[in-house]
Image: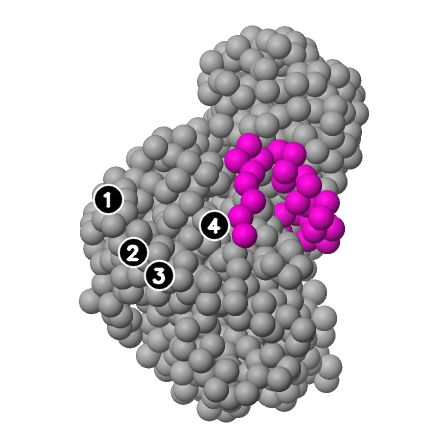
Amino acid sequence: MVSSSIYRDEDDNDDNVKSRQSKHDRLPAAAAVSSLPAPPMNTFRTLNTFSSLPGWNDDGDDGIIMKDLDSFTEGYFIDEQMDRDDYLNNMDQFSQQSKTHTVPTTTTTKRTRQNKSRSIMILTVLILVVLTIVLGVMLPSSNRQGTGDEESSNSDFTSPDENTTSKETSSPTMSPTIDPVTLDSNNDNSNNNSYTEPPQHPQQQLNHFFDLAIQWSGEDSFQDVTTSASRALQWLLFQDPWQLMDDRTVSDFTVQQRYVSAVLYFSFLDDPEMVVNNVVFNNTFLSGMNVCQWNNILSQQEEPDGVNSTRGILCDSQGNIQELQFQGLGVSGTLPKELSHLTNLVKINFGQNFISGSIPASLSRLEQLEIIDIRNCSLTGTLPPELSNLSNHLESILLGNNRLSGSVPKSWSTLTNLRQLDLAFNDLTGELSPEFSALQLHTVRLHGNEFSGSLDTVFCIDNPLVTLTANCLDPQEGIECSCCTFCCNKQGLECTLTGAWLGDAGVATTPPDVVTEKLEKLQAILEPISGQALQDPDSHQSIVLHWMVKSDPNAKDLDEMGYVFVVQKYVLILIYVATNGIGWMDNSGWLNATEVCAWKGISCHSDGLVDDIDLGNQNLVGTLVSEIGVLGNSLQSLMLHGNRWLTGRLPSEVGLLTYLTSLDVSGCQFSGPLPPNIGGLSSISIFNIEENFFSGHIPSEIGGMVQAKSLLLGSNSFTGEVPSEIGSIASLERLVMKSSKLSGTIPTQLSGLERLSHLDLSRNSLSGRIPSELGSLILLEDLFLDANTGINGTVPEDLAFLPRLKQISVHGTGVIGNLDLLFCTGEVQKITANCLDPLVKCTCCALCCDANGEKCTVM
């Protein structure tokens, strides 16, 4: 609790302090459920801090004036450095419910104001007594809907249907199996979550929530109003559509989960637009739904591109948060220490983001935690020794590709359930303790660090490991490891398969003449596919050739297998070797005695031909081999998304996969031009190459994808114009070409896409007017043209008549005019524009930016 000394005036004696503490140590909060706006948390008791909050002004001797509740938390999202007076003026201009209220202060800091201050304090007590009596009569009839001002304030976070629905009827669950009553009540099944009878008075409710926040985040977290904890508490008290301040039955456990989830959201606001426009955060986080629905599960059901990777917060049937799945969302920020209060967490995955800072040692309190996955981020600092407290359940520590330093804590050798340890590509040093040999690890990745010493005494005695990688290519510069399956140079960039992985590849287990005959026969089959690469003993193709001849545990007579199945197996093993298969997240079945159709990620037709390769998010490292085109007669789905270290060019042979219906290589590092013969993918339905480094012009041949429903080309480095040939793909439903370097005008031919529901051309260098022909896209729901400074003129009136349009984004463009007349009275739910510019009028916009589209405010 905050020390009472902060309340003292300069000449206060102990009696004065004691008296003030007993009657006035908390600011009046009855206004939270009445027509008065609620004051902030009692952390901000001092006048200097209190008056610095956005939405509050120091009114000299008479107290503190608070603007309308909407302005209390808005303004943090985009432009934290905006002058407070300018911000308040902006809010006055765009808020339809702007009001001014006065809340008397409880202290002053100058001796000359003492008498007046104390008079105000006495008057405040009298007012509170009256309000308490009035509220005692009014509260039982409250339906938790709040006032009209409150509903207006909450509209940013709820769908139109939710705006008119009370909390009791909003089904705050993740799935039908979760009982809403269970979520709102005390959870007896949760660990270490004691129930405290909630206070019945609004003043006590505010004080109680604040005390909980202090307990969970600490006092220091509230000394600065811009911290994630401070923002989360402000939102929870004053803007949360759930309106917990009105709920006299809510448990501390429910408040805790909601508060910590909000802290997590505000911790990721280093790039606000990334968060606001993200499918996981948009319309779920900070909404009136229960935190168990703060995910993309519902939106996935409406996605025609087949995305099935769940992101966000996931709960069990009792409403306990069990998983935090935020991998690959591109968010930035830090991991908040408050996560340690989600004591039922089993899995956290923040991989493939721009998360910085250190790993919170407080994670060691999560006794149920099984998986920690924060790979491919920008973490710094040392490995927390405290994680050794998680010995009961922790199975995986995956921290590869960060900037962590120091040594591996010896205490981690007590993690008896640990099976995976990935520390590759960090700045770690020192030796590993021999005590790690007692662990039953099956995968250890240590390459790309500065480790020293020998691993032989740690892992090479009765070694149960399937995968062990280290900088053991040159023991003089790296580490000694005779049982490593993969040895790399000092930098960890050049790696070689070792005898431990090849097994008996160098030793003939059959008579030499039989080996020679089989080798010659197999080489003759594979030469038309791989050519001279088979003659290079260091090539992947040669390694696979010799392995199939000498070491394949499921080897069969080539004539018995048949040409098609021999080639099919060769291509799959080649993919494995070329992408560091021993380092995959899950390579179960590969290269053992089972048939290829039983290998992880491989599915086959009933005739045994491969029709599906799904190696997404498997940590593939390397390149995609050109031999993939050989599977053109059977392959229907190729999923390689989320493999951050899959590099090189997309082989032109991909265009030979004429039966392919789904191709997803998003979130990799492919580069170079897109091969023109992708137009040969005449059966393709989903084509997703987002978040790579493709460059050059988008080939006009792309118009040959005549059955495509989703073309997702965004977040690359494409130049040139949007191919007009795309307008001939009549089946197209989603077209995303955002965040590239495209120029020219928007093709009028896009009006031929009669089934198009989602069009995103944002963040390019497009110019000219928005074609009125887009008004013929009667199924269009989302139109994103923002951050194209060359787009100008007014929005065509034809767009106002699109019956299904829900979102339109034109901020950061030169578009001007009155958007109110076009969209504010229709069904459009979210509009963003440069409505801080006098030339643009949009009172219903969700995001308003200045004329340059640089400084923006969430409305």
Is residue 691 depicted above or below 365 in this figure?
above
Contact between marks 4 and 1 (CB within 8 A): the answer is no
Q: Which of 482 and 441 is in front in this view?
A: 441
Q: Position of residue 356 (x, y in %)?
A: 63, 64
How many marks overall? 4
Q: Can residue 830 be seen in this view?
A: yes
Quadrant holding the C terminus? top right
Q: Nearer the viewer, mark 2 or mark 1?
A: 2
Measured Cα–Cα span from mark 2 to mark 1 = 14 Å
Left or right, 171 with reference to 225: left
Magenta part of the chain: 75-102
Q: Which of marks 2 and 4 is in front?
A: 2
Q: Nearer the viewer, residue 561 or 445?
A: 445
Q: Is residue 525 visible?
A: no
Contact between marks 2 and 1 (CB within 8 A): the answer is no
Q: In which quarter of the image is residue 565?
A: top left
Q: Mark 2 points at which residue?
A: 133
Quick one: label 2 or label 4, which is nearer the N terminus? 4
Mark 2 residue type: Ile
Q: Which of marks 3 and 4 is in front?
A: 3
Q: Which residue is drawn at 63% across and 40% down?
A: 91
Is residue 258 depicted above or below 299 in this figure?
below
Measured Cα–Cα span from mark 4 to mark 1 = 20 Å
Q: Name the residue under label 1.
A: 141
Left or right, 491 with reference to 330: right
Mark 4 residue type: Pro
Q: Name the residue under label 4.
A: 37
Q: Where is residue 483 in the image (x, y as percent from the top left)?
A: 53, 79
